[in-house]
Amino acid sequence: MLTLYYAPHTISLATHILLEEVGADYETVRIDFGKTEQRSPEYLKVNPKGRMPALVTDQGILTETPAMLVFVAQSFPKANLALIDDPFAFAQVQAFNAYLCSHLHVAHAHRMRGYRWVDAADTHSIAAMQRKVPEAVGGAFEMIESEMLKGPWVMGERYTICDPYLFTLAQWLEADGVDPKKIPKVVDHRRRMSERGTVKEAIGEELA
């Protein structure tokens, strides 16, 4: 049994979708950011980082979305969602997800979590970071649009662990001030993802 600790409207949705995709036997535990439950002693025992998500497995606890996605994919190899049978293709999957994790998601976080980089009382710096978000996030999505999204799925004809990850981040692009007209392939990918039954199931559970 796998247990996913999640919060609505966070990156945990990517792993949640993947658990649905592979038909995993799992349960979820909702963490309420409004009550700062991510900083509670109980949750910090699960994930000392105080971040979302966390995945409890029979072997231990995993954090960090790229690692969790690969673990789920390798635990259900018949689905072949990480392309691990091809070393170069798997490396490409990892490269794409690493870009989402280290660049796009970080750029997005500057809109509401600038306190991670400067003192919360430094309102001038916080505001400056927020003003930069449309450019930084938009530039990352334009890179994905022009150089990385092969279509119809991220890796081409094969649906992989990259797709729920990109979809989750694309949920927030308008709020980040990104013009969707500049990234039509990303927006079309988001639309097609939203039509998948597994995606609807995961979103429905998180928003229930």
Image (cartoon, rainbow, N blue to C red):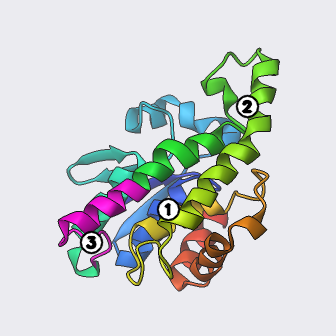
For badge 3, the amino acid type reads Leu
For label 3, the crowd category at 10 Å Cα-Cα, with few meaning under 14, some 14 to 19 and many 20 or more, is many
Residue 49 percent across, percent down from the top left: 45, 32
Secondary structure of the residue carrying tag 2 is helix
On the image, numbered disc 1 is attached to which residue? 165
For label 2, the crowd category at 10 Å Cα-Cα, with few meaning under 14, some 14 to 19 and many 20 or more, is many
Q: Is residue 81 magenta?
A: yes
Q: Earlier in the sequence, mark 2 or mark 1?
A: 2
Q: CA distance from mark 2 to mark 1?
A: 24 Å
Count of residue discs: 3
Secondary structure of the residue carrying tag 1 is helix
For badge 2, the amino acid type reads Met
Foreground tag (2 vs 1): 2
Secondary structure of the residue carrying tag 3 is loop
Q: Which residue range is magenta in the image?
A: 80-96
Foreground tag (1 vs 3): 3
Residue 103 percent across, percent down from the top left: 53, 44
For badge 1, the amino acid type reads Tyr
On the image, numbered disc 3 is attached to which residue? 83
Do we see residue 1 in this rendering?
no
Is 22 situated left or right of 32 in this image? left
Q: Earlier in the sequence, mark 2 or mark 3?
A: 3
Q: Quadrant location of the N terminus? A: bottom left
Q: Which mark identifies residue 129?
A: 2
Residue 168 percent across, percent down from the top left: 58, 62
